[in-house]
Image (cartoon, grey):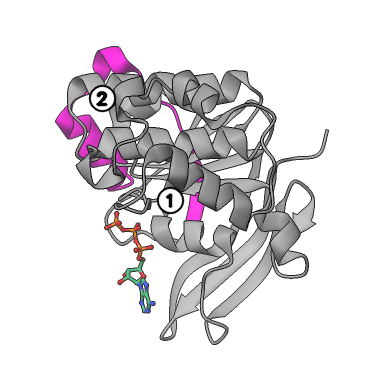
Amino acid sequence: MTALLSIAQLSLRFAGRDILQQLALTLHAGEVVSVLGSNGAGKSTLLKSILGLHDAGVDQSGQILIAGLDIQQARPQALAQLAYVPEQPAVYGHLSAIENIGYFLRLAAVTPTMEISAYLDMVGLPAHAWQRPCSEYSKGMKQKVMLALALAKQAKLLLLDEPNSGLDPQATEELNQLILQCKKKGMGVLVVTHDVLSAMAFSDRLLMLANGQLQPVLLDQSTLTLDSLKQLYQGQA
Ligand SMILES: Nc1ncnc2c1ncn2[C@@H]1O[C@H](COP(=O)(O)OP(=O)(O)OP(=O)(O)O)[C@@H](O)[C@H]1O
């Protein structure tokens, strides 16, 4: 089975400082992987590498394949396979959910297999909001629009940056369930987060980014304390 995300020997330097060092990661269909790490560890840098967003001048080496497609050599085809939800979901405030999704699908030259409203229904966005401008939406509602777009686009790989930040407990639970729904549909999901409890709830694997590399983390919710987490982040666990 082709991995949906395959990263090999990824190294990246900013101003002579190593941020990622020979980093490796493989993620398959139906798998949710969460990346934890201290502030400044390089989590957003890693996402940017996967998205091919670094300036041409950035010192980066290694290989990133999305559904078997090289992000450097077949960028448009590789990017067509993924959906990215940034920490602040990027939707046009003056457009409604339906208009936003319609616009982004047209940009991607994708014809959805169902009505856009069916995808909004699937992610649980209340019908009364569908035609309202997204500037009136909460963060959780904007995330739902972006997840509906990911489903309509039939993205294979979903990247989520800090999805739980700024969400109240109910919105957090709804988002966690949506991530599991994407997993059930066979998407591969990569989450960068500081919300360890949520990550434990929806992830198949937890990884810690430290010293430019990803290491597996095993956590037991029953013994989790702030102290044990601090130790984990300091590499002493
Ligand atoms: N364009 C850039 N030029 C130079 N240094 C950068 C650049 N972007 C990020 N950095 C540095 O690279 C390091 C990793 O940053 P990054 O934003 O990836 O960390 P992070 O793990 O996402 O942190 P946080 O949890 O705070 O969001 C930091 O020291 C940051 O200052």
Q: Which residues are magenta?
A: 213-237
Identify the residue at horizontal 63%, vertical 22% (top origin).
185
Outermost residue on the right side: it is: 1
Classify mark 2: residues with Cα within 10 Å, few (<14), some (14-19) or many (20+): some
Q: Classify mark 1 as within 8 Å of ligand 1 or not, answering yes or no.
A: yes
Asked if residue 2 lies left or right of residue 177, the reply is: right
| Three-letter residue code for mark 1 | Leu
Position of residue 137 relative to residue 178, above or below, is below
Identify the residue at horizontal 57%, vertical 24% (top origin).
183
* Numbered badge on residue 98: none
| Three-letter residue code for mark 2 | Ala
Quadrant position of residue 125: top left
What x and y, as percent, mark residue 194? 29, 41
What x and y, as percent, mark residue 99? 45, 44
Q: Nearer the viewer, residue 116 or 64?
A: 116
Residue annotated with mark 2:
171
Separation (CA) of disc 2 from disc 1:
27 Å
Q: Nearer the viewer, residue 150 or 125?
A: 125
221 in the magenta segment: yes
The secondary element bearing badge 2 is classed as: helix
Residue annotated with mark 1:
209
Ligand 1 position by quadrant: bottom left
